[in-house]
Image (cartoon, rainbow, N blue to C red):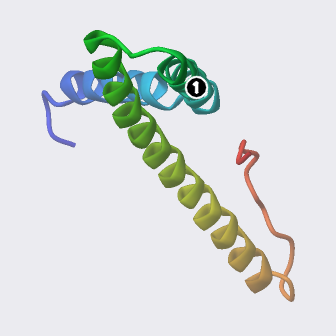
Amino acid sequence: MVHGWTGPSRVLKLCLKDWHQQHSKNLDGKISAVKLRLSSLDTKGEEDELMEEEVEELHELLVRLHSLSRVQTSMNWQKARMAWLFGVVCKQNVGGGSCFVPACDVG
């Protein structure tokens, strides 16, 4: 172990954990909220001309929706890979004993 790295590495770990929670928590809700606002602006645009600020917001919402969808897709791929990996490990252990799979929320 390298002396002097305990503090900074712990701080980095806590910062990364905080960042992950802020960016990946309740993705479905965030995506739904963006879609709802997009729908609202779309309906308003059909009835009347959108103001410049609303057009700008519309573009920002589309970028945000794309970004959130990419994060969600990435997380779903990671969950699928983990499920596959646990399945492979369990199949390898079928003849020789039990399969230990740690409890985790994959859905």
Please report the residue visible at 86 percent of the width from the left and 89 percent of the height from the top: 95
Q: Which image quarter: residue 54?
A: top left
Residue named by callout 1? 39
Q: Residue at the front extreme?
A: 48
Which residue is depicted at the point 76% across and 58% down? Answer: 101
**Position of residue 8 measured from the top left corner of the image (x, y, whole percent):** 19, 24
Is residue 62 rendered to the left or right of residue 35? left
Question: In the rendered view of the protein, which quadrant contains the C terminus?
Answer: top right
User: In the image, is residue 89 above or below residue 80?
Assistant: below
The kind of residue on which mark 1 rests is Ser
Quarter of the image for residue 6 reads: top left
Q: Nearer the viewer, residue 29 or 3?
A: 29
Q: Where in the figure is residue 67, as x and y percent of width and height?
A: 39, 40
List x then y, in percent, for residue 44: 52, 16
Q: Is residue 7 above or below residue 69?
A: above
Looking at this view, name the residue that lies furthest to the bottom.
95
Residue 52 or residue 60, whichever sits in front: 52
Residue found at x 70% / y 48%: 106
Q: Is residue 51 left or right of residue 2?
A: right
SS assignment at label 1: helix
The residue lying toward the viewer, choosing from 11 and 34, is 34
Residue found at x 56% / y 31% = 31
Q: How crowded is mark 1: few (under 14 residues within 10 Å), some or many (20 or more)?
A: few
Question: Number of marks in the image?
Answer: 1
Q: Where is residue 15 in the image (x, y as percent from the top left)?
A: 31, 22
**If the image is split into quadrants, where does the N terminus sit?**
top left
Relative horizontal placement of residue 75, taking residue 22 as reference (left or right): right
Q: In the displayed structure, would residue 74 be above or below residue 36?
A: below
